[in-house]
Image (cartoon, rainbow, N blue to C red):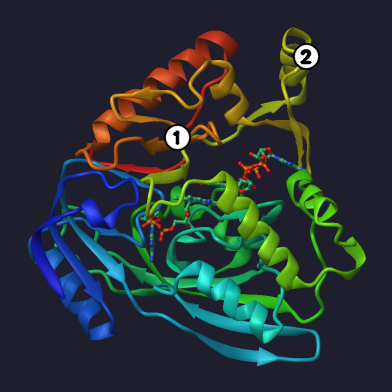
Amino acid sequence: MLSENRTIVDLNTLRLSGIAAAYAEITSDFELTEALRYASERQLPVLPLGEGSNVVLGERLNRLLLRDKRQGYELLSEDKNQARLRVAAGQNWHELVQACIQQGWYGLENLALIPGGVGAAPVQNIGAYGVELAECIDVVSGIFLPADNTSQQGGEPWRLANAECQFGYRDSIFKHELRDKVLITSIEITLQKHFVAKLDYPSLAEYFDAHSMGRDTLSAGDVFDAVTAIRRARLPDPAEIPNAGSFFKNVVVSTDQYETLHGRYPDMPSFAMDGEPTLRKIPSAWLVEQCGFKGRNFDGIGMHSEQALVLVRKDPGAKAYGRQVLALAERITTAVLERFGLRLEIEPRVYDM
Ligand code: FAD
Ligand code: NAP
């Protein structure tokens, strides 16, 4: 299904307004080939889009927005310890997490309720509560998109093993060398049949203490329920309050720089980085809050009152554009830089601004 001059308001969870030159939803290889042909004949850059929960889109997108709607998973192999699955890119992430727990395949519980589709999950190496997708992913597969400004049609398949995806903290090769050059069509993951709870994050551990639930007897369903409940209490539901999740990445500094900062700001929270003893992570939510932006409303856009890192539309009924969102982000970035000497980086992908 392909449409031209398509409004984008229902294609992004910030519900930003704008028009895309074309939009195609595909459910088969044939439709994919047709969409790529359409784009290359018009030399229209192709932008893969999932559920639009991690993008800031401009008003005028001279692109074909391409949504792969193919869903579901297949069991590739299993033994008494593990199950290996291939999951289609159009599969909703949270429903996959739910289905895996029901099957007795564990490892994704801490990643419950992350919005979006499977295709986007490796792009940012989605993570939450101390778990990252990279921990269970074996292979990411897809096709090359038509190269910009050429008549090369694209469609050539590729397959990358975990080590080749250059996964890092909310990062991967798909944000760098392969940025906007490929469509991810499926991922292969290995899940465990013996459940081990990962409760490193204080909010999770505190939840079980508050509910008098002993940590030794927890099931994957208990962790799934806890993550879901904590997130529902703290994070705005995009269906009601348009947002794109955390708007800024956490700041990562050297331990030396951290020592200097800590001397000046003894209350500044920080966390060790797994496997990176010379680095320290500073929660950007704290920096934004210290600069006075938490909960404030700037002409219908502001930072959430429960979570200072989440930029929200405070007047969902009004029209809003990507440039307004970026103007507020710039204001916050400047304030944090002037006060702490730290530069915030926007997490969602920004297009055509
Ligand atoms: P989109 O926003 O549609 O796309 C994001 C990027 O991926 C774009 O650059 C797009 O071009 C690219 N892309 C999408 N699909 C494909 C594909 N098939 N092939 C190639 N490229 C593709 N993220 C976390 O990591 N942890 C969290 O806990 C978390 N919580 C969130 C909470 C809320 C309330 C919200 C709104 C967002 C949150 N996010 C979180 C961010 C977001 O959910 C993830 O980044 C998610 O993976 C985005 O999926 P999507 O399908 O919406 O991607
Ligand atoms: P939280 O649990 O209140 O923690 C606040 C911040 O401190 C987070 O940024 C987290 O880093 C860090 N942190 C807490 N405990 C840590 C530990 N033991 N080790 C290392 N870092 C620790 O965070 P929250 O806002 O309620 O979010 C909960 C989880 O969901 C977090 O993992 C967060 O990343 C994720 N989330 C992501 C998005 C997004 O759009 N990317 C949106 C909402 C929530 P990390 O962020 O590195 O985990």
Q: Which mark is residue 266?
A: 2
Compared to 49, does 33 lie above or below? Answer: below
Kind of residue indicated by mark 1? Ile
To which quarter of the image does residue 86 belong? Answer: bottom right
The count of marks equals 2
Query: Residue, x 47% and y 59% (percent of image)?
Result: 115
Mark 2 sits near ligand 2, with its Cβ under 8 Å away: no
Nearer to the camera, 22 or 156: 22
Query: Left of 54 or right of it: where is 217?
Result: right
Compared to 275, does 262 lie above or below? Answer: above
Where is residue 259 shown, x and y percent of the image? Answer: 78, 17
- Label 1 vs label 2: CA separation? 26 Å
Mark 1 sits near ligand 2, with its Cβ under 8 Å away: no
Q: Which mark is residue 303?
A: none
> Element under label 1?
loop
Quadrant that contains the C terminus: top left
Q: Name the residue under label 1.
A: 346
Residue 28: tell me if it is visible.
yes
Where is residue 142 shown, x and y percent of the image? Answer: 41, 72
Where is residue 6 shown, x and y percent of the image? Answer: 12, 58
* Label 1 vs label 2, nearer the camera: 2
> Element under label 2?
loop
Nearer to the camera, 107 or 277: 107
